[in-house]
Image: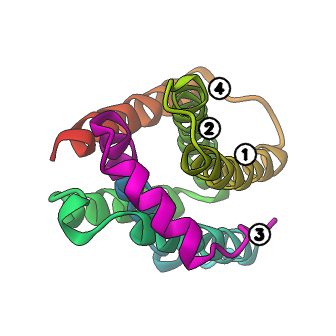
Amino acid sequence: MNTSPVSDTTIKQCLDFIVQDSTLLADLRSDHAGETGAVWIYKGILSGSGDPEVREFASKHLEAESRHLALMEALLTQSQRSSLLPLWRLAGFLTGYVPSLMGSRAVFLVIEAVETFVEDHYLKQIAYLQNDALRSQSSSQLVTLLKQCLEEEKHHKFDAQARLSYSATSLEVWLQRVIYRGSGLAVSMARHF
């Protein structure tokens, strides 16, 4: 899977559309923060794990998350981005690094939880844009870009799930809920700061 290159014209049209909608701007600010965190999750995994399978998994998905981050950076000016980026980098790094010390299963469980949240998050944004009364070409182009990111995020989730050899234990389910809720808290904060 590969996010398609985005033309400067598409970016310009999306930028013009974004500044007209404070809800959308807050959503994209949280997306930028999330993609920043995702890049740092994979950097954390690579810093902590010596497992060849985990390293291959993290390297592959780091490339996709880096493309998503570049897209979000193109869509938002510096002043429109979260002011808490150092926190998102640290939180992302620790979210990847700590499980990598526990082994491959912990890494795949955490990624599955994070990507489940991201999938839900993108689906809500896409629904918002598709229900928007301003439906314009810019809105349609932004939906297309978000859907491309969504498909790659789902691929990351399914890849992590496929590497888990058995169902999650009660403790692992609890851990995934904590990760999911923590992701939700981060989005709420990033929307405002």
Q: How is the image coloured?
A: rainbow
Q: Residues within 10 Å of mark 4 (few under 14, many from 20)?
A: few
Vertical position of residue 119 compared to residue 108: above or below: above
Specify the segment rendered in magenta: 1-30
Q: Earlier in the sequence, mark 4 or mark 2?
A: 2
Task: Residue 114: give x, y in percent of width and height.
Answer: 53, 43
Task: Residue 182: give x, y in percent of width and height.
Answer: 35, 35
Please give the residue where the numbered disc 2 appears in the rendered image.
119
Please give the residue where the numbered disc 4 appears in the rendered image.
169
Q: Earlier in the sequence, mark 2 or mark 1?
A: 2
Q: Is residue 68 visible?
A: no
Q: Residue at x 44, y 37 (%)?
A: 179
Please give the residue where the numbered disc 3 appears in the rendered image.
2
Q: Residue at x 28, y 58 (%)?
A: 88
Q: CA distance from mark 2 to mark 3?
A: 17 Å
Q: CA distance from mark 3 to mark 4?
A: 33 Å
Q: Nearer the viewer, mark 4 or mark 2?
A: 2
Magenta span main SS: helix
Tell me the kind of residue under disc 3.
Answer: Asn
Tell me the kind of residue under disc 4.
Answer: Thr
Labels 4 & 2 near each other (Cβ < 8 A) = no
Q: Earlier in the sequence, mark 1 or mark 4?
A: 1
Labels 2 & 1 near each other (Cβ < 8 A) = yes
